[in-house]
Amino acid sequence: MTVTGADQDATGMTARRYWWWDRRRSVVLDVGLALVSALECALEGVGFAGDAGLPVPLGVVFGLVVGSALVLRRRWPIAVVLVSIAVTPAEMAFLMGIVSLYTLAASEVPRRITVVLAGMSFAGTLIVTFVRTHQDVANAADGDFRPGPWYVPLVSLFMSLGLTGPPVLYGLYIGARRRLMESLRERADSLERELSLLADRAEERAEWARTEERTRIAREMHDVVAHRVSLMVVHAAAIQAVALKDPAKAVKNAALVGDMGRQALTELREMLGVLRAGDAGNARERERQGSVASAVPLAAVGVAAAAAAAAEAEDGPCLADLEALVGQSRQAGMVVELSVEGDPVACGPLVEQTAYRVVQEALTNVHKHAAGAKTWVRLAHRGSEIAMQVENGPSDGGAADAGLPSGGNGLVGMRERVTALGGVFVSGPTDAGGFRVSAVLPARPRGVS
């Protein structure tokens, strides 16, 4: 026998089936009812054999066969009801008639069939009861009992309704209740599947938010560390070169190195402080909710909130700091020209920070790969856009190479920053042998205030 999903119980174990019965107690119940019905029909078959002029054993066997048909009530309820209707004139199978009508009404048989068969059973019972009661009244006419003309129809009606109505109504109630329970169970299963799907989606969003946060932290760490440390290495090399020849200049360069180191540490502390504050806020929110199920979506929201807070809420660099940024490169010996065009427009903090970081990383790349090259930094305000360009000429062959390592992530980070705000980023070598970095950012990107 092939085992399907319907043959498994709620625990996932394969449920044993007994022919058309799902459970053992159903087998016991139906077999017990069939035995009682067969015994009833066998006893009633004695009277039927006497009225029909048949041998008594034949009537008993007929009753046993008819009554045992009740064992098929779950498999073929219509057939069992038809058998009970067919033997109604023999005045037997009352138990089978009641149980079969209940089973038919509680089953998934179309309601019109149930109504037709219930009507046939009612009509058959009414006719047989009317005839038998009329005969009994006629036989008792010579006695003291003299009922009115209403007696026979009324008794026949009550008997028919009593044997047909209650089992049908109770079967309809049980069937409706069973269907309601199955509907509720299916709805609960559907809700469980939806909750599982939502949990999976929340986990995906949380993983996406964590990935975005890791990428953002990597960009911030790269921008802060790479630029400051690059300048510190350049100044350290200058100190080493002039320490004996010009002590005053060496002291000045050493002071610059200290200032840049403190600035780098300050920016790192600010970044880590925002992240710690975001983690603490997420933990408090999870404690307030007090639900394990809410931990996953809260994690997604919390990490995303931490990323947004770190990117926007912190007091990061802005366009007004470009002059100081260019000044630091000049102090390191780079020849840099800064030009600003157009009237400044109001920009979001994330836009200004991105523009600053693009210029910062471009200058860092000049320090790394084009020592001694002349550099031009251009910033243009164009109404709803901000354009920036950092271009350097060919490297000065006489300049000392600081030996700064390169991980190849600078241009990737700049492109990610710009495209995330809906901007355009272009970079590449120039015809003169230098390198150019250009970016255009919308002053008010969608979804960013």
Image: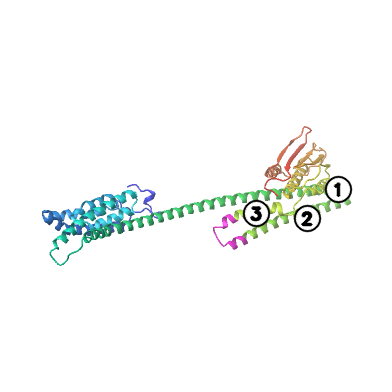
Label 3 amino acid?
A: Ala
The residue lying at 78 percent from left, 54 percent from top is: 263
The residue lying at 71 percent from left, 54 percent from top is: 313
Question: Mark 3 highlights which residue?
Answer: 305
The residue lying at 78 percent from left, 55 percent from top is: 262
Q: Secondary structure at mark 3?
A: helix
Residue 22 lies in the magenta stretch: no
Residue 289 lies in the magenta stretch: yes
Label 1 amino acid?
A: Val
State the extent of the magenta-drawn residues as a range. Answer: 284-298
Question: Mark 2 highlights which residue?
Answer: 262
* Left or right relative to 334: residue 1: left
Q: Residues within 10 Å of mark 1 (few under 14, many from 20)?
A: some
Mark 1 or mark 3: name the one nearer the start of the chain: 1
Residue 327 shows in the view: yes
Q: Are marks 1 and 2 in contact (CB under 8 Å)?
A: no
Of the pair 300 and 95, the residue shown nearer to us: 95
